[in-house]
């Protein structure tokens, strides 16, 4: 395993990422998946999916205006992160009762 990682790191120069290339970090992640789950990842299929996802994103970007993309992003963030409501008035009261009184 370590020999294979060293071989990959040595063999792969660090060029700028290409449109359809697997980065060193992605390659290491794929190796980790293979080792952890006993799977074999098809690199060609991975690259095809990566290119398809990139093309789909480019199509979406061209088809939408900035306001629409911002609204989608805001919506996805709101769904992903539940806002926490904090009652500052009750927190202040609880905090002030816990403080020691000066003698």
Image (tube, grey):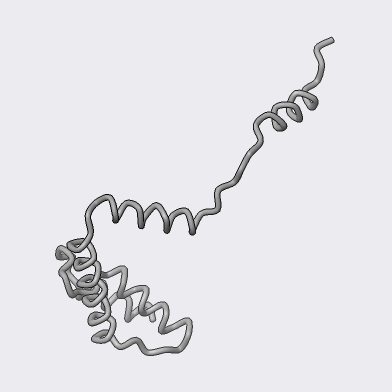
Q: Is residue 96 left or right of residue 5?
A: right
Split into 4 quadrants, where in the image is the N terminus?
Answer: bottom left
Q: Is residue 61 above or below residue 3?
A: above
Residue 5 lies, in percent from the top left, at 32, 76
Q: Residue at x 80, y 20 (%)?
A: 100
Residue 28 lies, in percent from the top left, at 34, 73
Number of numbered markers: 0
Q: Residue at x 27, y 80 (%)?
A: 49
Classify residue 87 by image quadrant.
top right
Classify residue 29 by image quadrant.
bottom left
Residue at the outermost top position: 103
Camera-nearest residue between 27 and 45: 45
Q: Is residue 92 above or below residue 33?
A: above
Q: Is residue 87 left or right of residue 7?
A: right
Camera-nearest residue between 67 and 4: 67
Q: Residue at x 47, y 53 (%)?
A: 78
Q: Is residue 78 left or right of residue 51?
A: right
Classify residue 93 by image quadrant.
top right
Residue 69 lies, in percent from the top left, at 29, 56
Q: Residue at x 23, y 77 (%)?
A: 52
Residue at the outermost right position: 103
Residue 59 lies, in percent from the top left, at 19, 68
Q: Is residue 5 above or below residue 103?
A: below
Split into 4 quadrants, where in the image is the C terminus?
Answer: top right
């Amino acid at each position: 395993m370590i020999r294979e990682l060293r071989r990959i790191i040595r063999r792969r120069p660090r060029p700028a990422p290409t449109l359809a290339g697997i980065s060193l970090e992605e390659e290491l992640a794929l190796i980790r998946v293979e080792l952890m789950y006993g799977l074999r990842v098809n690199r060609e299929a991975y690259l095809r999916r990566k290119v398809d996802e990139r093309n789909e994103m480019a199509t979406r970007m061209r088809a939408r205006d900035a306001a629409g993309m911002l609204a989608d992003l805001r919506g996805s963030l709101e769904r992903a992160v539940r806002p926490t409501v904090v009652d500052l008035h009750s927190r202040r009261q609880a905090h002030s009762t816990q403080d020691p009184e000066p003698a």
